[in-house]
């Protein structure tokens, strides 16, 4: 059985995509741009410490390293997500990795030309991936991908912000990867920036600057995200006490855990556990997505419903043609009136 789970790499085009059931909170972030389109149901989205509700067909686009989490408010809530590597955009804009942005739709703009076209291209890409890898499908897929990414770039260009960072000298990718690997393996213990700096052989200030420049978040924020992500999974999948979870995930004490948790999720760990368990689903940190089968007819129908769409260029052509026809009719009427007066 095939599922809506794809990775596509060809020349400089690089993305992966899924259609999955949204269930309990999962705090995460990505090294690339995330595009999420809600196909069915409603979700609470926690993004950059803001919480808002997304309705069916709402979309959100987030820059790399934006922390976010989703919680389904209805059964069978389903989302389409596409992750695009920041390196793709950097082929055209070397500074893209520095940009921060969040674009999202709501009732006021859900059906405007941009978000309508976004859903169209995203749905078309998923359907083309299902149909196979013949040259014509591949060409049409890349056409939709480039139309999608160019439209997104135009939109974010107007709203992006660039944090003020001191630009340090280049650090090798291999060295930085070692630092990240150390954090990923030891975040449950007490860990200091000095420890990370020693791994690379750099001073603390240099390491701090480079860390934020590369990931878009500070060292402390990165460690905090790892601890919160682990804590949310344990709250749902175990009966361990909140204090024990706080300690085992690396928090100094339960007070620090509660403050950090409420700031990100706008609820307490205990309330989060209660709400999440009411969803009746178990999840895993690295394999939590319930990917939808390509045999689900209702999902295929939802994707197909996003396809009817006219580009602005085509709309302009049709409007110009209609205006010309109107002018022609006016001219004919004026000619008829002139003859009658004679």
Image (cartoon, rainbow, N blue to C red):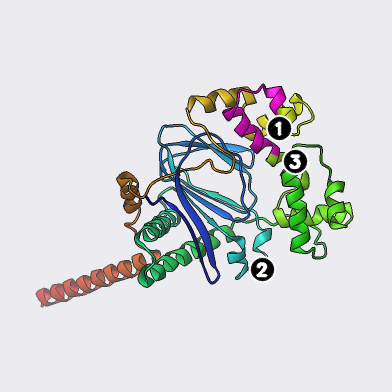
**Disc 2/disc 3 C-alpha distance (Å):** 32 Å
Residue at 27% from the left image edge and 72% from the top image edge: 324
Whether the magenta-drawn stretch holds residue 228 is answered as yes
Q: Please state the horizontal and vertical placement of residue 219, each as a whole percent of the image.
A: 77, 47
Position of residue 309 in the picture relative to residue 287 (left or right):
left
Please say if 225 is above or below 88: above
Please report whichever mark, 2 or 3, sits nearer to the chain's N-terminal start. 2
Circle 2 is placed at which residue position? 94
**Disc 1/disc 3 C-alpha distance (Å):** 15 Å
**Disc 1/disc 2 C-alpha distance (Å):** 34 Å
Q: Please state the horizontal and vertical placement of residue 109, each as a whole percent of the image.
A: 45, 48
Please report whichever mark, 1 or 3, sits nearer to the chain's N-terminal start. 3
Circle 1 is placed at which residue position? 260
Please say if 333 is above or below 23: below
Secondary element at tag 3: loop
Secondary element at tag 2: loop
Position of residue 230 in the picture relative to residue 52 (left or right):
right
Secondary element at tag 1: helix
Whether residue 4 appears in this view of the structure is yes
Residue at 75% from the left image edge and 25% from the top image edge: 255
Please report whichever mark, 1 or 2, sits nearer to the chain's N-terminal start. 2
10 Å neighbourhood of mark 3: few (<14), some, or many (≥20)?
Answer: many
Farthest residue, direction front: 1
Farthest residue, direction right: 203
User: Which mark is in front, 2 or 3?
Assistant: 3
Depth check: give the residue in front, 186 or 220.
Answer: 186
Whether residue 266 appears in this view of the structure is no
Q: Please state the horizontal and vertical placement of residue 256, each as a whole percent of the image.
A: 76, 29
Span highlighted in magenta in the image:
227-245
Residue at 66% from the left image edge and 29% from the top image edge: 262
User: Which mark is in front, 1 or 3?
Assistant: 3
Circle 3 is placed at which residue position? 187
């Amino acid at each position: 059985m095939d599922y809506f789970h794809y990775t596509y790499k060809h020349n400089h085009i690089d993305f992966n995509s899924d259609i999955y059931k949204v269930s309990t909170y999962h705090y995460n972030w990505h090294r690339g741009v995330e595009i999420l389109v809600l196909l069915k149901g409603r979700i609470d989205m926690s993004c950059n410490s803001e919480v808002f509700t997304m309705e069916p067909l709402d979309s959100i686009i987030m820059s790399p390293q934006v922390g976010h989490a989703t919680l389904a408010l209805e059964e069978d809530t389903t989302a389409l997500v596409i992750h695009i590597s920041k390196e793709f955009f950097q082929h055209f804009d070397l500074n893209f990795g520095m940009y921060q942005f969040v674009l999202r739709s709501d009732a006021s703009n859900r059906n405007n030309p941009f978000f309508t076209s976004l859903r169209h291209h995203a749905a078309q890409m998923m359907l083309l991936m299902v149909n196979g890898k013949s040259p014509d499908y591949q060409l049409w897929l890349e056409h939709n991908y480039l139309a999608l990414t160019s439209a997104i770039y135009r939109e974010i260009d107007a709203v992006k912000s660039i944090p003020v960072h001191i630009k340090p000298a280049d650090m090798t990718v291999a060295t930085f990867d070692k630092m990240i690997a150390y954090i990923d393996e030891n975040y449950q213990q007490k860990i200091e920036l000095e420890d990370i700096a020693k791994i690379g052989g750099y001073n603390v200030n240099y390491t701090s600057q480079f860390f934020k420049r590369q990931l878009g978040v500070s060292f402390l924020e990165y460690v905090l995200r790892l601890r919160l992500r682990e804590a949310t999974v344990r709250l749902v999948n175990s009966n361990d006490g909140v204090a024990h979870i706080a300690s085992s995930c690396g928090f100094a004490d339960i007070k620090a855990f509660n403050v950090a948790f409420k700031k990100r999720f706008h609820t307490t760990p205990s309330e989060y556990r209660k709400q999440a368990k009411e969803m009746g689903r178990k999840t895993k940190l690295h394999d939590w997505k319930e990917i939808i089968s390509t045999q689900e007819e209702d999902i295929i129908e939802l994707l197909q419903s996003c396809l009817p769409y006219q580009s602005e260029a085509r709309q302009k052509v049709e409007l110009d043609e209609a205006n010309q026809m109107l002018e022609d009719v006016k001219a004919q009427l004026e000619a008829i009136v002139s003859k009658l007066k004679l």
